[in-house]
Structures are given as structure tokens and as C-alpha cells.
């Protein structure tokens, strides 16, 4: 078992680096009054099959892309925070005696870990964070334990080091989403303990997260994303993968694209969101959601927000964690505005620098 920093608090700014199945996204933030300023940002696509279902399959290709994204972003920072996906991480709240030192807690968790973690202990990276005292029992404290397979952490660390970066923290994607969500709370119609869903639609993965009062209470991942739309464009119009991706972004496809390709894809996406809501309702005591945010690269499809809102009957908006941020002079304002819904994780990771 290896002890790893899921919860440590860094002392200086770090690059937030989101490694998805299709791209590497970099965000560097600084403090600006009570808010943040974007100092650097860049998004670069990954070669096909570099990351498959959030597992790194080609370290060399990934490290080369990371090196390029750092160079093109203009950041001078080396300290970096990346993340492992929520589905690969086990988080569990446990209770321990209040008087233990950090080292004693670590030893106690190692002794008891096989109760909580279904992997061989020598293959596990873990960390813990003391949340606070147990209600009505001052002799115990609540401790949040996070653990995942060591290889998931190691592969990310190796890719960052091969690109010349210093990996300071490997975070959990869900924690980064919670941080970024704080920046979007003022976009809600009401204040208070809102039940908010975020549908993050990437290239290959659809992640549905529900938060109450800013804390995740439900999360589910499914294999579905924009790659399926690109593949259908490629198949139907006889284009290469690169041509299909560019046509999807810039237009210029035949007249039947909207009705024969795009509309069925949007319909399938709406079905995924509807089913995810139903799964959430059936597995919790909630039977409602106050607000839905769409995130990820696919969410920027023209007209999607209105179509989703009309189909499912929920207030729906594009996730924009950058809405109230200042931008450094080197940032292309229109480019980052287009990318904003896909930067949720990278922004949440970069925010970790200031906790």
C-alpha cells in the first residue's frame, strides 16, 4: 500500500491538467480579489487510443501532448495537479479515535483497510482527511478515506514527469467538480440547498453528477460521447477521422446532416440524461432536481441546451466556471469562451492551489 496525496494542501499555484480520452486541457489561475484570473490555458487533442476509458494506454504519446500543451499555453509553472476518475476511486467515511496522531491514523487505516478496499493492499494508493468530530461522541472523529489502484496514480505521475512537470497532487475528479461548481452557484435561479445535476458529455464518457448544497451525493459514468457522432459523420460521408472531427466543429456537411445524423445523436443524449435522472431518483430519497448544467465538449452543440430543457422539463444551462473570471492579456477571449464548458475539471483542479 502506498500513501498518496489526494488531500494535501499545496502552498503555491499549480497547473490544473485534465487528461481525458480525447484531449489534454490546461488551466493556470491566480487570485484576483475574491475571485480568480486565468493566467494561461490551452486545449490540445490526443492521438487516438492514447487514453482508453480513462486508462493511459500510451505514455509516450500522452507525455508529448502534455509537453506541447504546456509550451503552447505559455505557463511558466512546473508544479501540476492532475486527477484520477471517480469510478476508479473508492471514497469512504470511517470513524477513528480522536486522540490519534496522523501517523497513528495511517497505521490504523492500513490495518483495517481490507474492510473498505477490495484490492490487494500492495496495489493500493490511499490518503485520508479528518472531517471533524463524530456527532454526540467526542472520542471519535470522522475521517474521509480515498483509495485507488496504485497504477492509476503512477501512470499519471510518470506522464507528467516525462513532460518535464512536477506532479504535486493527484486529485479525484469528483472533488475538482465540487470546487468548480462553487463558481457556478450564482447562475442558479434560487439560493439555498439546491439539488443540482451536472451532465458532463466528453468524447467517450458521459458522467452524471448530482450535488446538494455543493456536495456530491450521486455520480455515474457511462460509455457515451461525442466520438459516436464523429464516427457516424465519418461513416456516412466517407471522411477520415480528422476530417469528420473538423466538419463537426466547423460545419460544411451535406444538408441531411442535421436530420439524419445530428438529431438522432441529440435524441440519444437526451435519453442518457433522462435515464440518469431516473437512476438517481430510484437510488436516493430525492424525486426532483432543481437545475441541470451541461458540461464537456459535446455540450456546446448548437441548440442543445434548449432541446434538453424542453425534453426533460428542467431549467438547463451551459456550465461556465469562467463566467466571473478575469483573463490575462495573452488569453483569446472567444476561444476560451467556446471551451469553457469543457474546462470544468481543469478549473477545479487549478483551484486546489488556493485551498
Image (cartoon, rainbow, N blue to C red):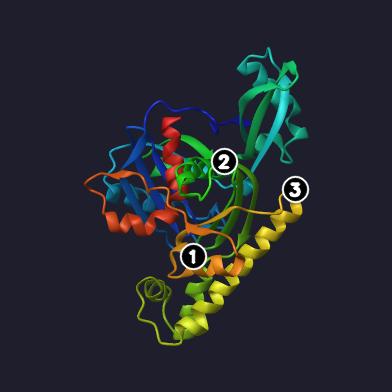
User: Which numbered dot is residue 133?
Assistant: none
Of tags 2 and 3, the one toward the viewer is 2
Identify the residue at image location x=56%, y=69%.
310
Q: Is residue 13 above or below residue 314?
A: above
Q: Is residue 31 above or below residue 40?
A: above
**Marks 2 and 3, how far apart at CA:** 18 Å
**Percent from the top left, x then y, of residue 116?**
74, 35
Q: Which comes before the other along the chain, label 2 or label 3? A: 2
| The one of 214 and 115 positioned closer to us in this rendering | 214
**Percent from the top left, x then y, of residue 43?**
36, 55
Position of 76 with respect to 341 (left or right) is left
Residue picked out by circle 1: 305
Q: Is residue 136 above or below residue 267?
A: above
SS at badge 2: loop
User: Looking at the rendering, in which quadrant would you find the N terminus?
Assistant: top right
Identify the residue at image location x=50%, y=84%.
259
Q: Which comes before the other along the chain, label 1 or label 2? A: 2
**Percent from the top left, x then y, of residue 201?**
53, 60
Residue picked out by circle 3: 285
Which residue lies most toward the right here?
115
Residue picked out by circle 2: 192
Residue 158 visible to the viewer: no
Q: Which comes before the other along the chain, label 3 or label 1? A: 3
How many other residues sit within 10 Å of disc 3, few (<14), some (14-19) or many (≥20)? few
**Marks 1 and 2, how far apart at CA:** 24 Å
The answer to the question of whether label 1 and label 2 lie on touching residues, with beta carbons closer than 8 A, is no
Q: Which quadrant of the structure image shows residue 160?
A: top left
| The one of 303 and 77 positioned closer to us in this rendering | 303
Amino acid at each position: 500500500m502506498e500513501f498518496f496525496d489526494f488531500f494535501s494542501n499545496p502552498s503555491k499555484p499549480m497547473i490544473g491538467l485534465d487528461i481525458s480520452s480525447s484531449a489534454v486541457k490546461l488551466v493556470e489561475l491566480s487570485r484576483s480579489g475574491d475571485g480568480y484570473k486565468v493566467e494561461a490555458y490551452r486545449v490540445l487533442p490526443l492521438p487516438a487510443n492514447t487514453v482508453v476509458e480513462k486508462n493511459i494506454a500510451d505514455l509516450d504519446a500522452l507525455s508529448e501532448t502534455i509537453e506541447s500543451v504546456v509550451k503552447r499555453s505559455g505557463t511558466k509553472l512546473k508544479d501540476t495537479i492532475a486527477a484520477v476518475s471517480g469510478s476508479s476511486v473508492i471514497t469512504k467515511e470511517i470513524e477513528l479515535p480522536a486522540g490519534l496522531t496522523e501517523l497513528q491514523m495511517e497505521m490504523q487505516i492500513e490495518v483495517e483497510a481490507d474492510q473498505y478496499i477490495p484490492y490487494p493492499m500492495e496495489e493500493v494508493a490511499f490518503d485520508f482527511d479528518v472531517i471533524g468530530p463524530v456527532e454526540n461522541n467526542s472520542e471519535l472523529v470522522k475521517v474521509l478515506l480515498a483509495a485507488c489502484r496504485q497504477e492509476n496514480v503512477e501512470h499519471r505521475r510518470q506522464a507528467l514527469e516525462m513532460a518535464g512537470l512536477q506532479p504535486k497532487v493527484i486529485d479525484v475528479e469528483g472533488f475538482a467538480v465540487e470546487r468548480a461548481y462553487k463558481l457556478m452557484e450564482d447562475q442558479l435561479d434560487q439560493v439555498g440547498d439546491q439539488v443540482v445535476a451536472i451532465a458532463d458529455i466528453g468524447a467517450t464518457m458521459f458522467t452524471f453528477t448530482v450535488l446538494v448544497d455543493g456536495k456530491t451525493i450521486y455520480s455515474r459514468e457511462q460509455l457515451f460521447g461525442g466520438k459516436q457522432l464523429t464516427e457516424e459523420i465519418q461513416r456516412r460521408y466517407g471522411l477520415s477521422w480528422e476530417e469528420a472531427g473538423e466538419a463537426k466543429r466547423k460545419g460544411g456537411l451535406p444538408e441531411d446532416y442535421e436530420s439524419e445524423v445530428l438529431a438522432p445523436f441529440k435524441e440519444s443524449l437526451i435519453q442518457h440524461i433522462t435515464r440518469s435522472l431516473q437512476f438517481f431518483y430510484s437510488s436516493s430519497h430525492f424525486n426532483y432536481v432543481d437545475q441541470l448544467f451541461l458540461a464537456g465538449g459535446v455540450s456546446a452543440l448548437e441548440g442543445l441546451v434548449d432541446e434538453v430543457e424542453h425534453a426533460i422539463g428542467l431549467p438547463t444551462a451551459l456550465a461556465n466556471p469562467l463566467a466571473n473570471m478575469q483573463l490575462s492579456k495573452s488569453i483569446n477571449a472567444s476561444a476560451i469562451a467556446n471551451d469553457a464548458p469543457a474546462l470544468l475539471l481543469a478549473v477545479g483542479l487549478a483551484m486546489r492551489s488556493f485551498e
